[in-house]
Image: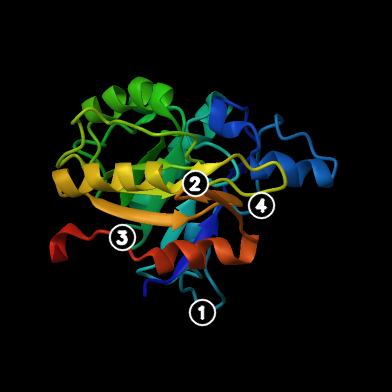
Amino acid sequence: MQASEMWNLWHGCHKKSEGCQNCYVFRRDEQYGFDTNSVHKTGSFSLPIRRNRQGQYRVAAGTLLWTCFTSDFFLAEADSWRDEAWQMMRLRSDLSFYMVTKRPERIEQCLPEDWGMGYENVTICCTMENQKRADERLPVMVALTLRHKAIICEPLLGPIDFRGRLGSWCEQVSVGGESGMDARLCDYSWVLGIRQQCLACQVAFHFKQTGANFRKDGRIYHIARKDQHEQARRANINIDPVHT
């Protein structure tokens, strides 16, 4: 299994769409009295290029860095920091970087000058939590020049029809319910509907988690946070097209 770490190079965000309603970052910041709408660089900004006393990189080659998961990499407030972030990703071509955004309309203007077809070690994933956001964001993602693109439907708030527009451009669709005290319902039929579309287009599918309130065959299950990933794994419905 590939080693992984979090790289939250800046913190803070603004709620953008329906999926943000119960955002875990806002919930956690509220507990500590932080204003999540205040965007700032973190002490981890230079993580990929830090070295130990022997002069070796602290983050080992081959590591997957989950990038900017307490913010959005394409926030306007981060425009002055982003070039340096791209530079670190370019320098550490031996690492993989995976970022999720709800702002695909800002991606093109935020790419580095040497982007070309995209950096081989960077995957950009777009959130599409319901039909409205899929209809809005999917065409943008299809049109973008990105070497590695993915979709995440989390929290999944309703059935989604990708209208036959999944294909070779999308490497994976991940699906997950919502966690937390106020979690909204996730229905298993919505999960299976997305899976069927992935199967038809030979796109990888990952059922990430059930969420706290999960409906299957008309029955609602209240699932503890510690069990949500495991229950999704037990469903055994992931798809790897390479082995299909």
What kind of element bears circle 1?
loop
Q: First in sequence, mark 2 or 1: give its number.
A: 1
Residue at image coords 55%, 53%: 46
Q: Nearer the viewer, mark 2 or mark 1?
A: 2
Q: Secondary structure at mark 2?
A: loop
Say whether residue 57 is visible: yes
For the residues bearing labels 2 and 3, Cβ distance under 8 angstroms: no
Location of mark 4 (residue):
43
Residue 135 percent coordinates (x, y): 34, 22
Q: Quote the CA–CA distance across marks 2 and 3.
A: 22 Å
Q: Which mark is residue 218?
A: 2
Residue, x 63% and y 27% (percent of image)?
Answer: 14
Q: Nearer the viewer, mark 2 or mark 3?
A: 2
Q: Which residue is mark 3?
A: 238
Which label's residue is closer to the chain start, 2 or 3?
Answer: 2
Q: Which residue is mark 1?
A: 54
What x and y, as percent, mark residue 197? 23, 41
Q: Which of the two discs, 3 and 1, sits closer to the camera? A: 3
